[in-house]
Amino acid sequence: MSFLRRELLFSLIIAAISFGLAFIDLAGVPKAPGGTRCRALVTSVDNNSVRVNLIVKTNAQYLMVRLLDGPNKGKEVPVVNMLTGKMELDEFYEPGKVILVEYSTVNGQPANAVARGYYRLRLELFLICLFCALLLAVAGVTGLKAALSFIFSAMVLWKLFFPLLLRGFPPISTGLGIVALLIGVICFAVGGLTRRGLATFAGSMLGVLLTCGLGVWFTDMFRLHGAVRPFAEMLLYSGYPNLRLTDIFVASVSIACSGAVMDLAMDIAATMDELKIRHPEIGLVEHMRSGLRVGRAVVGTMTTTLLLAYSGSHITMFMVFLAKGLPAENLLNAPFVAAEVLNILVGSFGVVTVAPFTILVSGLLYRFAWKTDSPDTEPAEGGEPSGEFAAGGHLVEAK
């Protein structure tokens, strides 16, 4: 089978699995009672019942909306918007805005309508399509495989990982299994069914395993529990009091750093692959030494990746401590801040160590050349094969 056909078959399999995952329900949780959901245009508002305490709004805002789609399109419906006083959850509507409305049907007429937020679904879909189009335009076939990997990862997390946790599966081992699946699909989809893809997968998994081990160790030493995560306590009160939140926290550390780990592993593996293509006579030690020189440069910029990512998502929290004049000791010793420090540093251990892991695996893989009577390889720019797995071949030691 030619390289292009093999890659096409692999992509079709990933697309089919992603499509199939959309129709499974592993969680087995009864659907929340609800009715029809559709877009609606706010035509008028009544704020007389809204209570305002400084910047906090509570009680109910009454709206009149016109349904824009669904079986009752065009009808005017009263809507209640309950305000809880939490600004991160509440939305305050104005006339002329489009919102998502959920309502039940009584005697063929819409009733008991409630607001579910500004309507953003079409814009989100447009942004996803724009992102996939950009990937395709910039990276061609590789971009298409990357887009499929992106969709596959989202479906696996939503349809497999989260439901399995709700069903009581052990979070750490389940998380590692899900990460191995995602890393395998992404690495082989983007890197191809090649030694480059295999080196990326092996190096990434070694980095993630190290991260997981350190996460278990330091979570216990820090005396942290999984309830430091948002909505964790609400999850316990939702009918799942036996969930192991601490193990879920450790699993989340491994999953959170896996993207950066894969990124660095792919850079190193691609470098090792290109070195071997351009200089097939290079020895094992020199090959690994050259890869390490590149790895040092890449690691130098990757060490701040997780710091910037997590710090950026907690800007307001840090500003609160500064605004209140609290000392740095109080900030760093707080459990939710210590959890993020652990997340950043333990994840960074995986990011840093994945470079030597991938270099070691790549060096050993490229120590041997896979020879066949009729090579079935992906041609590189220089016209030389990049070293694929081919059926019916045999290993010989490279010069």
Image (spheres, rainbow, N blue to C red):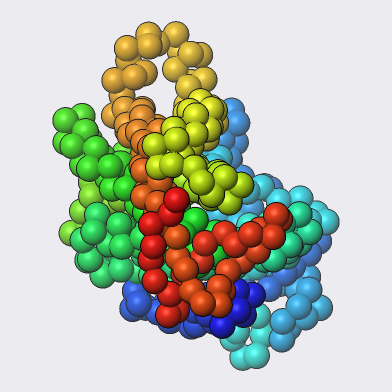
Q: Which of the 4 image quarters holds residue 69?
A: bottom right
Residue 117 locus on image (x, y percent): 63, 57
Depth check: give the residue in front, 370 or 194: 370
Q: Which of the 4 image quarters holds residue 327?
A: top left
Against 90, residue 336 (above or below) is above
Residue 232 locus on image (x, y percent): 32, 49
Q: Quadrant of the N terminus?
A: bottom right
- Going by the image, does 170 lie left or right of 267? left
Against 42, residue 327 (above or below) is above
- Going by the image, does 280 lie left or right of 369? right
Residue 40 locus on image (x, y percent): 74, 68
Q: Which residue is painted at 38% across and 66% down in the image?
A: 395
- Going by the image, does 388 lie left or right of 242? right
Residue 24 locus on image (x, y percent): 43, 81
Depth check: give the residue in front, 229 or 295: 295
Depth check: give the residue in front, 52 or 392: 392
Q: Which residue is painted at 32% across and 15% down in the image?
A: 330
Depth check: give the residue in front, 188 or 86: 188
Residue 238 appears in the picture as rendered: no
Task: Find the residue positioned furthest to the front.
Answer: 399
Against 379, residue 30 (above or below) is below
Q: Which residue is painted at 32% across and 48% down in the image?
A: 206
Q: Which of the 4 image quarters holds residue 347?
A: top left
Q: Which residue is painted at 47% across and 68% down in the image?
A: 371
- Going by the image, does 53 lie left or right of 100? left
